Image: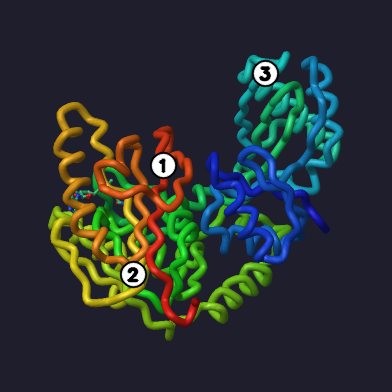
Amino acid sequence: MKYELIATSAMGLEALVAKEVRELGYECEVENSRITFKGDELAIARSNMWLRTADRVKIKAGEFKAYTFDELFEKTKAIPWEQFLPENAEFPVSGKSQKSKLFSVSDCQAIVKKAIVERLRTHYKKTSWFEENGPLFKIEVSLVKDVATLTIDTSGSGLHKRGYRVNQGEAPLKETLAASLVMLTNWTADRPFADPFCGSGTIAIEAALIGQNIAPGFNREFVSEGWDWISDSVWDQVRTEAEDLAKYDQPLEIIGSDIDHRMVKIAEENAFEAGLGDLVTFKQMRVQDFTTKRDYGVIVSNPPYGERLGEKSAVEQMYKEMGKALIPLDTWSVYIMTSNENFEKLYGKPATKKRKLFNGFIRTDYYQYWGKRPPREI
Ligand SMILES: C[S@@+](CC[C@H](N)C(=O)[O-])C[C@H]1O[C@@H](n2cnc3c(N)ncnc32)[C@H](O)[C@@H]1O
């Protein structure tokens, strides 16, 4: 059976998610924050296991125009929900509405719920209430310009929850965004990698997972593992594939450092939890003191932005000192994400390229300074 699947993406990361979906072998289409592709049960399991940059994987149960509540009810009822939901399914309905006639989200949710109940009642020949004490199917009705899209979440916790973050600092980066930052660089596993503002270690840990081709979902479970129409053998197959494709022997040179020794400890704990304790090195150090004897490395960092009252001038001073330390490393490529619009001036060098990215709701730029190419690439 083929399903229509949606990998949801943060704004601005659609192209990366689409690339990952294609690399898994599925043709896809890209819309705003949604990458749509077709696949079977194995595709559901594989995309959850492997997508590093997507937020979730959902099944598109149906999509139609709905201008009235009657239309929403009838068209929802026409979807073969019994193909997905067993008699004891727990199926909460959430909703959202943008630029649509049906703008009352709570009414839309209630109507969708009622329509599904009616459909299942007829199918399961049920006269009493559904107990909803079985597996979870989170349903969403999303109305955009009068088009209703009904989806079922297959991921459970968002895909950024890899299962390794036991502790965090003040402004941890979402794992999906950290992976994206690494994937937007020219880093390959044979080159040194550093994050001199490592905080809880997210970027360094995601780089290590990428470097050894370890599936981001290897350490967690997914809600669709509880569904009886995706057999255990599918999940076994996907976990075996992940194990087979991991390159545990790939040596890596990844260093995370931070001015705050408490963050260094947290980063170490997180890396240990990810099973990468021996692979990533963390140490306490100021970015101003960053030096290296190695060539052709890559720095990826998410420094403080200085947005809080009273912090701006200290952060701007630190950006100047960072430029003095990093610009001389001319074989290194440096990638910095910050919301400070003056960054290039403070750092002391115009970026080779910049790319607009959102860190949650904060608009940032990803400043990219490409280093000299290694001789063999010339
Ligand atoms: C936005 S946080 C990084 C969060 C990290 N990406 C994560 O996922 O947890 C910025 C980090 O920069 C560190 N920092 C601030 N000034 C620094 C400096 N001069 N040198 C090195 N680290 C510094 C802070 O201690 C903080 O942990």
Name the residue rendered at 14%, 53% in the picture.
Answer: 260
Amino acid under disc 3: Lys
**Residue nearer the viewer, 297 or 132:** 297
Of marks 3 and 1, the one in the foreground: 1
Amino acid under disc 2: Thr
Q: Which residue is mark 2?
A: 331
Left or right of 298? Residue 211 is: right
Cα–Cα gap, marks 3 and 1: 29 Å
Please tell me whether residue 145 is drawn above or below residue 250 in the rendered image: above
Residue 44, given in percent of the width and then of the height, sits at: 67, 58
Left or right of 352? Residue 68 is: right
> Local crowd at mark 1 within 10 Å, few (<14), some, or many (≥20)?
many
Under 8 Å from ligand 1: the CB of mark 1?
no
Q: Residue furthest bottom?
A: 249
Label 2 sits on a secondary structure element that is loop
User: Which quadrant does the N terminus fall into?
Assistant: bottom right
Residue 247, given in percent of the width and then of the height, sits at: 48, 81
- The image quadrant that residue 113 belongs to is top right
Residue 194, given in percent of the width and then of the height, sits at: 30, 65
Label 1 sits on a secondary structure element that is strand
N-term mark: 3 or 1: 3
Name the residue rendered at 70%, 61% in the picture.
Answer: 43
Amino acid under disc 1: Asp
Q: Which residue is mark 1?
A: 365
Is residue 134 visible in the rendered structure shown here?
no
Please tell me whether residue 145 is drawn above or below residue 13 in the rendered image: above
Please tell me whether residue 63 is drawn above or below residue 264 in the rendered image: above
**Callouts 3 and 1 close, C-beta under 8 Å:** no
